[in-house]
C-alpha cells in the first residue's frame, strides 16, 4: 500500500509542519533534505520503514516522529498515520541540539494537532500543477 504524505492544516489555514520545513530550508538545509528523504521513504513503506528512521512517540498516542542528525543538530518532524485514508499527516517539527532533552511543549502541540486532525481530517489542499511550479 502506498501512503500519501500530507500536511495537517489548522482552521486558520496555517500548516505547522510546512512552516517548519520552510524554516529548515533557510537555516538547516542538510537537515531538511534528510527529513524530506525519510518522508519520501515513508510513502513507500509506511509504518514498516523502521531502521531507526521513524519511531512512535511514547506517551503520545498515535504520534510518530522522523528523527535525523546533522552537524550537532537533531531535527524531529512529528506525524501520524491515518490508515483509513492511507495518509501520513505531517503535524509539527522542531530542531534541537544533540543531547538536549526532547521538547515536551512541541510534543504536546503535535499531539493536539493530531487530535484536531482526527476530528476534522483537515489537510492542506493540493495546488494545481502550474501553481506548484511558480
Image (spheres, grey):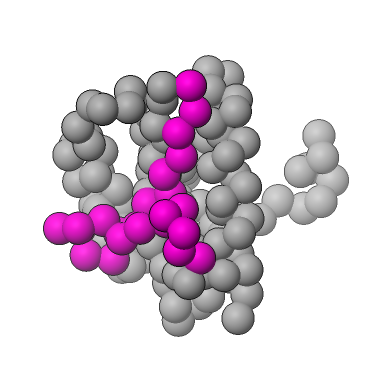
Query: Does the magenta portion include 60?
Result: yes
Q: Is residue 6 left or right of residue 14?
A: right
**Magenta stretch, residue numbers:** 49-71
Up the image or down, 44 lies above or below 126; here it is below
Q: Residue at x 39, y 40 (%)?
A: 76
Residue 130, quarter of picture = top right
Asked whether, in this view, residue 60 is left or right of residue 19, the answer is left
Seen at 38% across and 62% down, the residue is: 80
Q: Where's residue 89, x and y in %?
A: 46, 59
Q: Quadrant of the C terminus?
A: top right
Screen quadrant of the N terminus: bottom right
Left or right placement of residue 91 versus residue 27 in this view: left
Say how many tags the image has: 0
Q: Nearer the viewer, residue 37 or 118?
A: 37
Which quadrant holds residue 16? top left
The vertical placement of 49 against 93, above or below, is below
Residue 12 lies, in percent from the top left, at 41, 42
Q: Residue at x 53, y 23 (%)?
A: 28
Residue 16, can we see it?
no
User: Does residue 34 show up?
Assistant: yes
Return the x and y of residue 125 as percentages of the image width and height.
60, 55
Amino acid at each position: 500500500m502506498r501512503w500519501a504524505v500530507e500536511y495537517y492544516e489548522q482552521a486558520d489555514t496555517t500548516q505547522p509542519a510546512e512552516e517548519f520545513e520552510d524554516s529548515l530550508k533557510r537555516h538547516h538545509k542538510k537537515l531538511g533534505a534528510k527529513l524530506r528523504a525519510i518522508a519520501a521513504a515513508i510513502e513507500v513503506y509506511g509504518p514498516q520503514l523502521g531502521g531507526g528512521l521513524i519511531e512512535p512517540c511514547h506517551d503520545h498516542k498515535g504520534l510518530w516522529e522522523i528523527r535525523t542528525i546533522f552537524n550537532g543538530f537533531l531535527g524531529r518532524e512529528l506525524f501520524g498515520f491515518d490508515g483509513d485514508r492511507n495518509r501520513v499527516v505531517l503535524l509539527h517539527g522542531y530542531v534541537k541540539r544533540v543531547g538536549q532533552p526532547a521538547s515536551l511543549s512541541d510534543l504536546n502541540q503535535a499531539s493536539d494537532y493530531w487530535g484536531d486532525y482526527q476530528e476534522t481530517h483537515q489537510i492542506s489542499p493540493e495546488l494545481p500543477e502550474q501553481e506548484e511550479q511558480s
